[in-house]
Image (tube, helix red, strand yellow):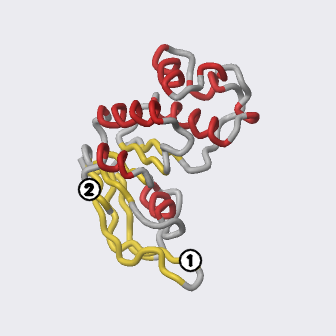
Amino acid sequence: MILIDAAGVSMSRPGRPLFTDLSVTVSTGDRIAIVGLNGTGKSTLLNVLTGRAEPESGAVRRGRDVRIGYLDQRPHLPPGTVRDAVGDNWEAASVLDRLGMTPLLDAAVERLSGGQAKRTALARLLVTESDLLVLDEPTNHLDVGAIAWLEERLAQHRGGLLLVTHDRHVLDRVTTRVL
């Protein structure tokens, strides 16, 4: 099933193009890495593909009823505790434990560090049904054990995957195509 189909998409920043006439189709089962230097438009591309931003030219179509799970570099969590944000069930507890967040279950999300908020947002995403996972730097703030666990978890995801990361090992183990 086609999840996202982008044709001739372009975006720029004042004085310089980020991407020009880009076309890509993302289907169920695709595992696509988006690679580039900092500031070259990787996050902007994710925003365009997921509908969070409109392209300057070209078109993006998303499949009907496609559930997109998005992990932003700077996640936004609802007010409340970590437990409130992720859930109070076995799967949520297990994912939070693997991400080292168990001691903070009852902590207010407003008081979390950037790394703790990112891990909480990642846990929230992983316990939600998604046809397409879109992950912008998911390994930032994770230790080696949590990264290995995340690789296994992503390998089990049956939907599509768009991944931005500078971690070459994760790219090699999780993705099958580079954009």
Q: Residue type at mark 1: give it.
A: Arg
Q: How far apart, in angstroms, are the residues tagged by discs 2 and 1?
A: 26 Å
- Rendered view: 30 above or below 118: below
Q: Residue type at mark 2: give it.
A: Arg
- Rendered view: 117 above or below 2: above
Tell me if 74 is positioned left or right of 130 in this view: right
- Rendered view: 12 above or below 61: below
Q: Position of residue 161 (x, y in %)?
A: 35, 46
Secondary element under disc 2, as helix, strand or loop, is strand
**Residue under the point 30% across and 63% down:** 24
| Residue annotated with mark 1 | 13
Check the image and name the residue furthest to the front.
144
Q: Position of residue 71 (x, y in %)?
A: 51, 45
Q: Nearer the viewer, residue 167 or 116?
A: 167
**Residue under the point 32% across and 35% down:** 157
| Residue annotated with mark 2 | 177
**Residue under the point 35% across and 77% down:** 21
Q: Nearer the viewer, residue 83 or 149?
A: 149
Q: Nearer the viewer, residue 124 or 165?
A: 165
Q: Position of residue 127 (x, y in %)?
A: 46, 28
